[in-house]
Amino acid sequence: MVLVLVYNHQGEAPAFCFDNLKNGFGLKPKGLETSADVGDKTFVIGGADNDSTSYIGVKIYDKSTGKWVIPTVLGTKPKACKGNSAILLNEDRIMIIIRGSTPDDCIWFLEVDTKYVKEQRKILGTEVVAWSRGVRGDAEKPVVISGPSGVGKGTLINMLMKEFPSMFGFSVSHTTRAPRGNEKNGVHYHFTDRSVMEKDIKDGKFLEFASVHGNLYGTSIEAVEAVADSGKRCILDIDVQGATSVRASSLDAIFIFICPPTMRELEERLRARGTETEEQILKRLRNAEAEIEQGKSSGIFDHILYNDNLEECYENLKKVIELKCHPAPRGIDLPSNHSVSKIDNKILINCETPELEKASKNLIALDVSSLKGGAPGRTRGLNVYALDSFSDGLNEKLS
Ligand SMILES: Nc1nc2c(ncn2[C@@H]2O[C@H](COP(=O)(O)OP(=O)(O)O)[C@@H](O)[C@H]2O)c(=O)[nH]1
Ligand SMILES: Nc1ncnc2c1ncn2[C@@H]1O[C@H](COP(=O)(O)OP(=O)(O)O)[C@@H](O)[C@H]1O
């Protein structure tokens, strides 16, 4: 196989042009693809995905073995595009700038050696990469809500979703427990068989899972991504074990624990709800004491709220999730024609406007020094500065 390296604009990662590339690994080479080297591996990004021509593909050339590897690709993939620029950040993720895409869809991160990718690689036993869409500024964090059965988590979440239907989306968990009378599959839970769920867990499809009150519960990566893809802020109703796992992941959420005013009141609420058998109620009450103890003492939760008076608790919930602090994240308007370079933690995008030709070369600087989150969620904290026409004052403006 002959591999021709094509260097694009100044400072940009070299693009691969494949000559005589046999179809041995199922990818259809399409024009130029970009690449980035991480250690012994060259990640080639672009062209068509292995499974679908609608998405960008990823393949890895391992220089130590001289072999190509098709990785397991996790996360929502960016749509196939006219080309992209790839820039390696911190040896663990590659920033991809997509040409000719919409403002909120042009910056992506391909994680190649982050904590999440390392974990998934261990679980799956294959080479793994994970996509995460870049979000400008401090887009709102997902909200994790935990608390004992019957404390009012579902009630509070419903109030939030009702008051702000376009702002919040519920992460629909999987569970092996039987549905209650009013519960709909795919809305309240994905009701599933234990064997199916265990296989999906083994296949790395879950962000977290736990055995709670004798049933298996879990948050699939897809459930969280579906909410993020709809442009909404994700709410997770999960137990303390699940919250502990999410805390250890890169999701970067706000963690809230809901406490009952007393154990007696908790029991009354559970009984009044009338959805569990006596045996199940007793099991839930036994587990509640340990959960409350853990919730209060583990240090996992950012906020502990008491649900005594429902309205008051709801007002407190709205305060702690910082409803009004962050403006809606805006996209980045990039023309198709641009070149990219990297200086320390800043990515400079040199936009060439065809009408003005050489007269104006506008610069956009992306500051990647405060990135947060990442796969399986969004990568937040991308700071964007528009700089005026190319001038000698550039360094001053960027410092
Ligand atoms: N770890 C984890 N826990 C979950 C998940 N979904 C629900 N749970 C928790 O499982 C427990 C039981 O939930 P459920 O059967 O709906 O009963 P309820 O809490 O009495 O309404 C609660 O503590 C939920 O927060 C999940 O995806 N992961
Ligand atoms: N502050 C409150 N005061 C009285 N009853 C409440 C309060 N919050 C919730 N409830 C009731 O308690 C029961 C359990 O609430 P639910 O939201 O189903 O709890 P969870 O989702 O935590 O299991 C429901 O019948 C709900 O209407």
Image (cartoon, grey):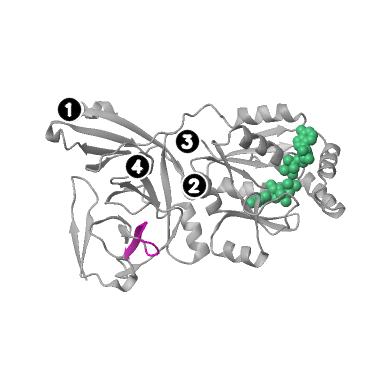
Mark 2 and mark 4 residues within 8 Å of each other at the beta carbon: no
Mark 1 and mark 3 residues within 8 Å of each other at the beta carbon: no
Circle 3: residue type: Ala
- Is residue 304 rendered to the left or right of residue 359? right
Mark 2–mark 4 distance (CA, rounded to whole Å): 20 Å
Give the crowd class for mark 1: few <14, some 14-19, many >=20 residues within 10 Å.
few
Q: In the rendered structure, find residue 392 and report the number of the disc placed on it.
A: 1
**Quarter of the rendered structure image containing ligand 2:** top right
Q: Position of residue 335 (x, y in %)?
A: 26, 39
- Whichever of labels 3 and 4 marks the residue nearer the N terminus, that label is 4
In the rendered image, is residue 44 in sight?
A: no
In front: label 1 or label 4: 4
In front: label 2 or label 1: 2
Circle 2: residue type: Gly
Residue where numbered disc 2 is placed: 377
Secondary element under disc 4, as helix, strand or loop, is loop
- 330 up-or-down from 10: above or below: above
Q: In the rendered structure, find residue 102 and report the number of the disc placed on it.
A: 4
Q: Position of residue 84 (x, y in %)?
A: 28, 50
Q: Position of residue 171 (x, y in %)?
A: 59, 47
Q: Which residues are magenta?
A: 50-61
- Is residue 74 rendered to the left or right of residue 18? right
- Whichever of labels 1 and 3 marks the residue nearer the N terminus, that label is 3
Residue where numbered disc 3 is placed: 139
Secondary element under disc 2, as helix, strand or loop, is loop
In front: label 2 or label 4: 4
- Whichever of labels 2 and 4 marks the residue nearer the N terminus, that label is 4
